[in-house]
């Protein structure tokens, strides 16, 4: 059995894709509610308890900020770093205390780059943030929405299903930073589905619909290299 924790934001089509990619002897189940001896009870009432031989804990990791120990600036006990405005800025300190790269289930390096541009533009004075009170209020409202929906608090920084809107908002708020190119988004979405449908072969498998996007990315890279040579 595989715990389905973290699949909360998946729609039915994506869940079917995940389930179909699993081996025949692997079953996706709900979050574990309790363990008694060898019997596991799940949170979702429609799922009957099961008896198992072994439990393998795949718990991920905990956020830690030892460099801020004792400052009381942030809290990490609940499986997220808080308070943060837009997963990035501390309301009190603004760009002077920024946390780039907290998001997960993302297109990593472009995600980090767009966040970093916003931080850099704030530090250089080319754009400004809302007031401390406004940022704190927005962060609190965001956390309240998560808890009000009954979602897991430790999935706060999960960007699955929301990262493109988030990155558009970051680019817009940074005052002129370029948005993420469409070909990168397209490749990410194609490969996300491909990985679920072909978990063993996806690294070596190129789908026809990927080719024009790969070519667009290659042309962009060649143009960038040509610009560098002219410097």
Image: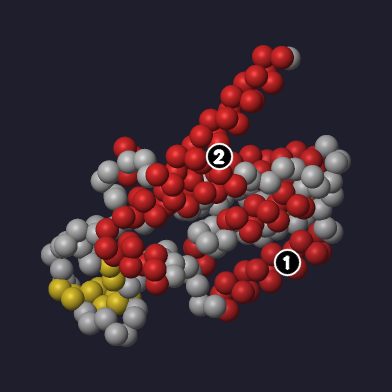
- Residue 21 point in image, percent of width and height: 27, 58
Q: Which mark is nearer the camera, 1 or 2?
A: 2
Decide: few, some or many residues near mark 1? Use Cα within 10 Å; few <14, some 14-19, many ≥20: some
* Residue assigned mark 2: 109
- Residue 99 point in image, percent of width and height: 64, 47
Viewport quadrant of the C terminus: top right
Which is nearer the eye, 206 or 146? 206
Q: In screen coordinates, is 150 left or right of 195?
A: right
Which is nearer the eye, 40 or 24? 24
Asked if residue 17 is positioned above or below residue 150 in the image, the reply reads above
Q: How is the image coloured?
A: secondary structure
Which is nearer the eye, 97 or 115? 115
Q: Is residue 62 visible?
A: yes
Q: In screen coordinates, is 131 left or right of 202?
A: right
Residue extending farthest to the bottom is: 45
C-alpha separation, residue under disc 1 versus residue under disc 2: 26 Å
Asked if residue 11 is positioned above or below residue 61 in the image, the reply reads below
- Residue 166 point in image, percent of width and height: 64, 57
- At 76% from the left and 52% from the top, the residue drawn is 172
Asked if residue 70 is positioned above or below residue 135 in the image, the reply reads above
- At 23% from the left and 74% from the top, the residue drawn is 40
Asked if residue 128 is positioned above or below residue 228 in the image, the reply reads below
* Residue assigned mark 1: 138
Q: In screen coordinates, is 159 left or right of 167?
A: left
């Amino acid at each position: 059995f595989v715990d389905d924790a973290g699949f909360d934001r998946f729609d039915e089509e994506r869940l079917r894709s995940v389930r179909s990619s699993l081996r025949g002897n692997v079953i996706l189940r709900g979050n574990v509610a309790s363990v008694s001896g060898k019997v596991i009870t799940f949170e979702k009432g429609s799922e009957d308890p099961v008896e198992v031989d072994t439990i393998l804990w795949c718990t991920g990791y905990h956020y830690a900020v030892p460099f801020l120990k004792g400052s009381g600036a942030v809290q990490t006990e609940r499986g997220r770093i808080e308070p943060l405005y837009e997963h990035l800025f501390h309301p009190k300190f603004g760009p002077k205390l920024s946390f780039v790269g907290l998001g997960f289930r993302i297109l990593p390096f472009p995600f980090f780059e767009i966040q970093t541009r916003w931080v850099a533009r704030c530090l250089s004075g080319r754009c400004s943030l809302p007031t401390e009170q406004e940022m704190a209020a927005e962060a609190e409202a965001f956390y309240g929405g998560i808890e009000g929906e009954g979602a897991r608090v430790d999935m706060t920084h999960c960007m699955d299903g929301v990262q493109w809107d988030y990155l558009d908002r970051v680019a817009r708020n940074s005052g002129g930073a370029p948005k993420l190119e469409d070909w990168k988004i397209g490749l990410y979405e194609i490969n996300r589905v491909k990985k679920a449908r072909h978990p063993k072969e996806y690294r070596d498998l190129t789908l026809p619909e990927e080719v024009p996007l790969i070519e667009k990315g290659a042309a962009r890279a060649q143009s960038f290299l040509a610009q560098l040579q002219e410097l």
